[in-house]
Image (spheres, rainbow, N blue to C red):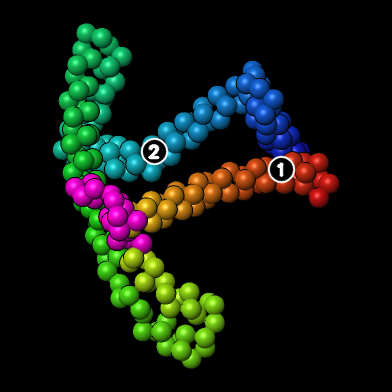
Amino acid sequence: MSEQIGLGIAAILTVMIFSFLYKDNPLYKFAEHLFVGVAAGYILALTWHNTIRPNLWTPLSTGRDWWLIVPLVFGLLLFTRFIPNIGWLSRWSLAAIVGIYSGLAVVAFAEADFVQQLRASMIPLFDTASTAAFVANPGIITFLRFIGNFITVVGLLAILIYFFFSKEHTGSWGMIAKVGTGLLMIGFGAGYGYTVMTRIALLIDRMFFLLSDFVHVL
């Protein structure tokens, strides 16, 4: 019985969200606000049980790590923004958060967006295994694998040339820059298509839920 009630509520909320296709209306706003509220509550509970309680509350309550009073005080100072007279105290916490996060993020971004990208770009023009596979079994698939590294390196150089603005984009230099522009457009289009497909997958999932789990016509 409780499962049927849950399915009914989920179906009603799904239809309320779909009502936005008609226009922005109170039903959609109610479902949207309910979703945001539930998500915020879920994240709050998850943060308490997985982060604050094991890393701050339990060590402090058992007297193991008294130095954790410092981050606790900084955390409480964030709530002083709701008190206008002492709201400036929250700047200390924000400064600490921004500084610590920036220090940690620099290392992560340098590794993920710089070192790994350079490592992925430093590849041989023609891979030995792909070359051997193409020679042994000529075909479209093996040929595409054979020229894959070459296209990657040439395309990367063309895109880098497009972003090199110290030389005027004319003549052969301009032609290479246009190739880089085309490759960038292909990359942006692939990213946009991936985003659209993700939304379409969500739509299909919701429609399947309504027609299969709720209406039982599939």
**Residue shown at 47%/31% (left/top)?**
40
Foreground pick, 176 / 92? 176
Q: Which residues are magenta?
A: 155-175
Q: Is residue 21 above or below residue 135?
A: above
Residue type at the position of mark 1 = Met
Foreground pick, 149 / 30? 149
**Type of secondary structure dominating the magenta stretch:** helix
Q: Which mark is residue 207?
A: 1
**Label 2 close to label 1 by CB (< 8 Å):** no
Outermost residue on the bottom side: it is 136
Is residue 165 visible in the rendered image? The answer is yes
Left or right, 116 with reference to 40: left
Secondary structure beneath disc 2?
helix
Foreground pick, 101 / 170? 170
Q: Position of residue 48 (x, y in %)?
A: 38, 37
Secondary structure beneath disc 1?
helix
Residue type at the position of mark 2 = Thr
**Residue shown at 54%/49% (left/top)?**
193
* Quarter of the rendering containing residue 152: bottom left
